[in-house]
Amino acid sequence: MLDRDGTLIEDVPYNGDPEKVRPVPGARAALDRLRAAGLRLAVVTNQSGLARGYFTGEQMRAVHARVEELLGRFDAWLICPHDDADGCDCRKPAPGLVHAAARELGTTASRCVLVGDIGRDVAAALAAGAAGVLVPTPVTRPEEVAAAGWVASDLPAAVDEILRRQQAVRPATPPDDPVRTALVVRSDSAGDVLVTGPAIRAVAAGAQRVVLLCGPRGRAAADLLPGVDEIIEYPLPWIDPTPAPVDPEVMWGLTARLSAVGADQAVVFTSFHQSALPLALLLRMAGIGRIAAISDDYPGSLLDIRHRVPVGVPEPERALSLAAAAGHRLPDGDEPVLRLRRDAMASRPADLGDPGYVVLHPGSAASSRACPPDLAARIAGALTAAGHRVLVTGSADERGVTAQVAAAGGTDLGGRTDLAGLAAIVADAGAVVVGNTGPAHLAAASGVPVVSLFAPTVPFGQWGPYRVPTVRLGDAATPCRDTRAASCPVSGHPCLSGIDPDEVVDALRTLAVSGGGGGR
């Protein structure tokens, strides 16, 4: 999907004259590359000039005919003819135009990419569950660039990366021999394990048996993943944020345990700031003969497949590209989205009422990514006043915070659920209001819309809710940006503290989540 003015053609305000149509540099060649790759193309464009009477429908269609004369045929044209004051659901940043275009193209928004030049384009894509690419122009505001998860220098560069990402998850060649047992590794927190799920399913599609090595912080999430036959739980001192000293006896024990797996292949998944090489050494010592991992550092003889991934790729796609490099892909019919084993989820407590409530999860294992309690309380009050039923969730350690927040409006579930129980609660929610933490990924795995109170300590493009309708709130340009800080490095938590609770209410409206428990 492509915006029209400023993205495909030069932006001439309220243009109704075909003679003024000028393609942006490289547009025709870039579009032809997408067509050659088998991708369907749609134009999604706000044209408020129709509502304001600046040009007629006939004049607009003449402009579009000229665009196709210069740039080739598009499979669909979706136009919003309204002005902002009309309150329609199709004018970007509302997602209606994106959903309509997806239907015209015979697909769903989560399988689409929208390229545009302003924040409205990216916001519309996210609210529909599509990927959004921002190609800035002189009219693009700096805050829009900061908030975008994917930025390209121009349209040809955007197309380059779209095609590269598409190709990256397709295996070049399968393994030489059938994989009887594959060892997959993700030793990190629950959210990290959840976003690796699609890649693990890809490995499972090509292996008879899958064994997952994870750490204690990710074990509960590992139990929820489809495709895993066995779990080995070990803390890895080069991964854990508060590691114990390296104990040689423990490392020898881990090596022996890995050797006993009898794996034909190991695929080591890591975050972009972690090294796979310490574990690769243990895997070599355990006798595993084929090891794949992402590594910018020189691996010597530790890796058979040294994979590289550019910065900025969403973590699920980053992991899927490693699985592809190791010869694995998702089977036909399995979409590259997060999924959970329904049989592993706990039953939702009956006293919570009907589905359709809003889950508000203020906490996070990293305090830099948590919502300030006073703000969360004001959000709870605003949601309740707007007619939403609010469930406030959190761990046992967060009971003080959840009690404070729920006192302003909502039911306090702090400490009442484990991860499997929280997954069941999230699955029946109309939406989840949450920061960059595990429940955001639980929501994505159940297709539940997310209002993302996203602290920019890590890139939104990598860690934002994946392929699920999302509205991002907060200041993306604060000094904590890209610091990876676990504790807030800036006084006052400015990235989130400036959020107006009414913005959350408006975000739910954008996501078509109604008050009164009506759900989606």
Image (cartoon, rainbow, N blue to C red):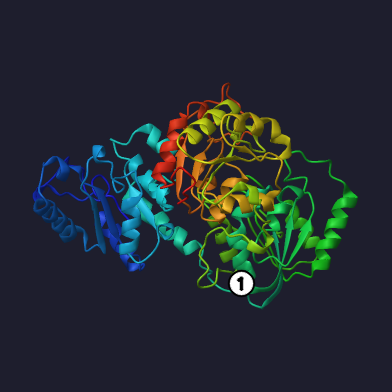
The quarter of the picture where residue 299 lies is bottom right
Residue situated furthest right in the rendering:
249
- As drawn, 431 above or below 335: above
Residue 189, percent from left and from top: 68, 47
Residue situated furthest top in the rendering:
491
Whether residue 222 sits left or right of residue 108 in the image: it is: right
Residue 195, percent from left and from top: 59, 54
Whether residue 231 sits left or right of residue 511 in the image: it is: right
The quarter of the picture where residue 49 lies is top left
Residue 296 visible in the snapshot:
no
| Residue drawn at (61%, 65%) of the image | 201
| Residue drawn at (63%, 41%) of the image | 393
Q: Residues within 10 Å of mark 1 (few under 14, many from 20)?
A: some
- As drawn, 9 above or below 398: below
| Residue drawn at (31%, 45%) of the image | 92
Residue 505, percent from left and from top: 44, 37
Whether residue 433 sits left or right of residue 286 in the image: it is: left
Which one is nearer the viewer's eye here, 86 or 49?
A: 86
- Residue wearing tag 1: 205
For label 1, the SS is helix
Which one is nearer the viewer's eye here, 77 or 265?
A: 77
| Residue drawn at (56%, 69%) of the image | 329
Label 1 is placed on what type of residue? Ala
Which one is nearer the viewer's eye here, 60 or 328?
A: 60
